[in-house]
Image (cartoon, rainbow, N blue to C red):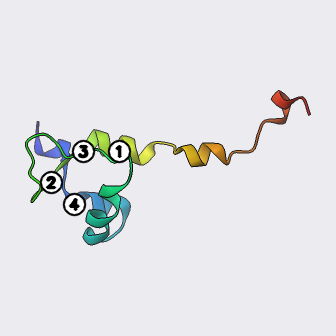
Amino acid sequence: MSDNELLDLGDISALYRCSRRHARDVITKLVGFPEIAPGSTPRNPLWLRIEVKAFLHRKTAKTQANRKPDTATLGG
């Protein structure tokens, strides 16, 4: 695994445009956020870039539940 495949807290905070503290205390603790990468430590956690980007672009169930129903399929 190369270094460009891993993200640290600074990279995650830049990706989400927030502070390192917010990334550490909120973003990385969200339900469904990827686990730390194998070989990284709790003191200096690293995450796989692919998994974090997939989490960022994933649609949540709440967003899908709030979508307006298609009237063509409802017969109305």
* Quadrant of the image occupied by residue 54: top left
Q: Residue 29 vs residue 5: left or right? A: right
- Residue sitting nearer the eye, 15 or 48: 48
Residue 68 lies, in percent from the top left, at 75, 44
Mark 4 and 2 residues: CB-CB less than 8 Å, in contact?
Answer: yes
Which quarter of the image is occupied by the N terminus?
Answer: top left
Which quarter of the image is occupied by the C terminus?
Answer: top right
Circle 4 residue: 9
Mark earlier in primary sequence (1, 3)? 3
How far is disc 1 from disc 4 in space, using C-alphas?
Answer: 14 Å
Mark earlier in primary sequence (4, 2)? 4
Q: Secondary structure at mark 4?
A: helix
Amino acid found under the numbered disc labelled 3 = Glu
Residue located at (38% from left, 44% from top): 55
* Quadrant of the image occupied by residue 42: bottom left
Circle 1 residue: 53
How far is disc 4 from disc 2 in space, using C-alphas?
Answer: 8 Å
Q: Which numbered disc, 4 or 2, marks the residue closer to the eye?
A: 2
Amino acid found under the numbered disc labelled 1 = Lys
Amino acid found under the numbered disc labelled 4 = Leu
Residue located at (24% from left, 58% from top): 11
Instruction: Give the label on residue 18, or none.
Output: none
Q: Secondary structure at mark 2?
A: loop
Circle 3 residue: 35
Q: Residues within 10 Å of mark 2 (few under 14, many from 20)?
A: some
Amino acid found under the numbered disc labelled 2 = Pro
Circle 2 residue: 45
